[in-house]
Amino acid sequence: MIESLQYEFMQNALAAGLLASIVCGIIGVYVVVNRMVFISGGIAHTAFGGVGLSFFLGISPMIGALFFAIASALGIGMISKKTKLPEDTAIGILWAVGMALGVIFIGLTPGYVPGISTYLFGNILIVSSGDLHLMLVLVTVIVSVIFLLYKGFFALSFDEEFGGLRGIPTGYLYFLLLCLIALSVIVMMQAVGIILVIALLTVPAAITKQFTYNMKKMMIFSILLSMVFTVCGLWISYELNIASGATIILVAGVGFVISLLFSKRSLY
Amino acid sequence: MKKEVVRLENVWVHYNRVPILEGINLTIYQHDFLGIIGPNGGGKSTLLKVILGLIKPDKGEIKVFGRPPEKSRERIGYLSQYKAFDREFPISVWDVVLMARMGLYEMFKRYSEKDKKLAESALKTVEMLNYKDRQIGTLSGGQQQRVLIARALVSNPELLLLDEPTAGIDAAAQREFYELLKKLNEKTTIVLVSHDLTAVSVYVDKIACLNRKLFYHNSKEIRPEDIEATYQCPIELIAHGVPHRVLKEH
């Protein structure tokens, strides 16, 4: 592993893994405590439509995915706040329609379309410097917004009604949180892929939730845990020459099972 | 003449075109301890939310401390129904209570010493200061309710609105809880909503019956016909005699 770090692709992969860990540690805690796992899955899968459109238009897939992810985040927010349509119905529809759009656009793109599986299952070994710069920008945005509005998001998560009564703009914060989830999905897309994003978003927070009830500690330990998962996964996938994204997720899954053995809370 | 705290005039609220509140007229005075009883779905929670300005009436006037309700929220403490939040949420008792000191501008700042002092004294009032580092879900139902009362008390509200505060609490804890309210009532106007008539009637000073329409005589007296209209079936009431008499002798 150490000697492999002399290669630029390995350095980039490691940097991408660590950046992704920061967002999944922080945003993952909100996703878990607010029970927004299905919403996050919906946002991630809708982003595939953007990947397809980007291939069709010949632009960077990250840009298209970002646009679709934000649009689906706002769409889900609008549907759940402004209409009486059940939220999970709306998410299910967006989820599948986004994927279908991606497939159609890729079909319409002339010639061979390379690396579709990269976006579905992730390939952290082909992260370019350009991708890394975009990831760095997104991570900075996410971390700053959370840092600035931590108390507001805390109130939103614990007791939205009470927060609203105290003058917290919970409606806007909810939309903002959905957008932050969308940005996180894009940061993590290269590392683990659209389909596997939910696992990396939920596993570290689900583990730390069993051991602390302090949300800030949950975030810090979730970041550290997901760094361990990504680095271990990267190393195993390099040594055994197997898919990096799937390996990272499997390591996280094993970590979750082990955590259950040490859990202080009874889960049944 | 006692000061008016809340005044509703001919307030109507509909949900999906079905009326929830029909022409409510209600005046609540300073130091009232008002119990509002009625069947589930009778509009009790809706009425509290109207007073908080969370629900806008389709028709009618509402004034709280002489102003529109959303302008008076600073002066109101509110305890929502028991099921309102996730017991597994990673939050300590201390942070639950401090949340009452949040606001649009405070959101960007750390809690001040004053905030912490207020939270501490509110927890002392409900005798829960020793539990301040516990996760909220590890407390018993009665203890959780005390913490939520503390949260409603932090900003020294002049009006306290309680929605089914004794649901899921055993009888002994309920009695303690009502004794606490009685003490708080010396300084605060209290409106308590419940579907449990007998428990409420012992402690409150005034009772109103609500089932879309409100029956209220600014006293603790309820007429049998009001009860029947509220619950829409004859209910056998036992008048306990002094000092807990609810029904007029008949």
Image: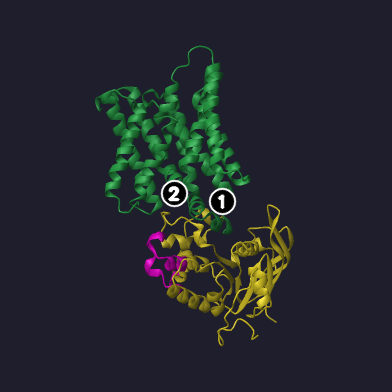
Chain colours: A green, B yellow
Earlier in the chain: of badge 1 and badge 2, it is 2
Residue at 32% in and 30% down: A247
In the image, are marks 1 and 2 on the same chain? Answer: yes
Number of other residues with Cα within 10 Å of mark 1, as a class: few under 14, some 14 to 19, many 20 or more: many
Alpha-carbon span between mark 1 and mark 2: 16 Å
Whether residue B186 appears in this view of the structure is: no
The relative height of residue A262 versus residue B21 in the rendered view (above or below) is above
Q: Is the magenta stretch mostly helix, strand or loop?
A: helix
Residue B159 is tagged as: none
In front of the other: B88 or A127: B88
Query: Which quarter of the picture shows residue A10?
Result: top left
**Mark 1 lies on residue:** A170
Q: Which residue lies furthest to the bottom in this view?
A: B242
Residue at 38% in and 45% down: A205
In front of the other: B222 or B234: B234
Q: Is mark 1 on a helix, strand or loop?
A: helix
Quadrant for the N terminus of chain B in the image: bottom right
Which amino acid lies under the numbered mark 2 shown in the image of this protein? Val
* Side (left or right) of B120 relative to B222: left
Q: Tell me the chain of label 2.
A: A
**Mark 2 lies on residue:** A33
Whether residue B240 appears in this view of the structure is: yes
Magenta range: B123-147
Image spot of residue A46 (x, y percent)? 52, 31
Q: Tell me the chain of label 1.
A: A
Q: What element carries label 2?
A: helix
Image spot of residue A118 (x, y percent)? 42, 24
Residue at 34% in and 32% down: A248
* Side (left or right) of A52 relative to A8: right
Image spot of residue B247 (x, y percent)? 62, 82
Q: Is residue B74 magenta?
A: no
